[in-house]
Amino acid sequence: MFVAQVTGSVVATQKTATMTGHKMLVVEPYRLDEKTRDRLVPTGRTFVAGSLCSSRKARAPA
């Protein structure tokens, strides 16, 4: 696990069935400042992460 800031979201026109209802987020991880070790600094990388905590089950088609 790591600390990261959410910088955006991903919109997909197609997903696998197992990803239905899951929110995809663009995140930028942070790390401790190596010199002072008293604050977090961005790493400069970007990842896509799946959020399972705020997801909800997909509705069945009507």
Image (tube, grey):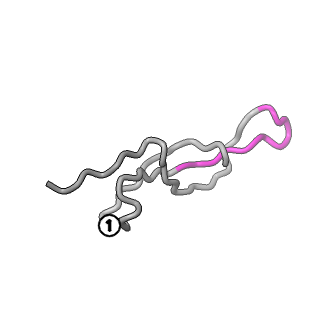
Residue lying at 78% horizontally and 40% vertically, measured from the top left: 33
Q: Image quadrant for the C terminus?
A: bottom left
Residue lying at 65% horizontally and 42% vertically, measured from the top left: 3
Where 14 sits versus 41, above or below?
Answer: below
Where 15 sits versus 7, above or below?
Answer: below
Kindly give the residue lying farthest to the top in the view shown: 38
Magenta span includes 44: no
Q: Is residue 19 left or right of residue 6?
A: left
Kindly give the residue lying farthest to the right in the view shown: 35
Residue lying at 57% horizontally and 55% vertically, measured from the top left: 46
What's under tag 1, amino acid-wise? Answer: Gln
Magenta-highlighted residues: 27-38
* Residue with the mark numbered 1: 14
Judging from the image, what secondary structure is the residue with disc 1 in? loop
Front residue of 55/29: it is 55
Residue 19 in picture, x, y percent from top left: 40, 60
- Label count reads 1
Front residue of 31/57: it is 57
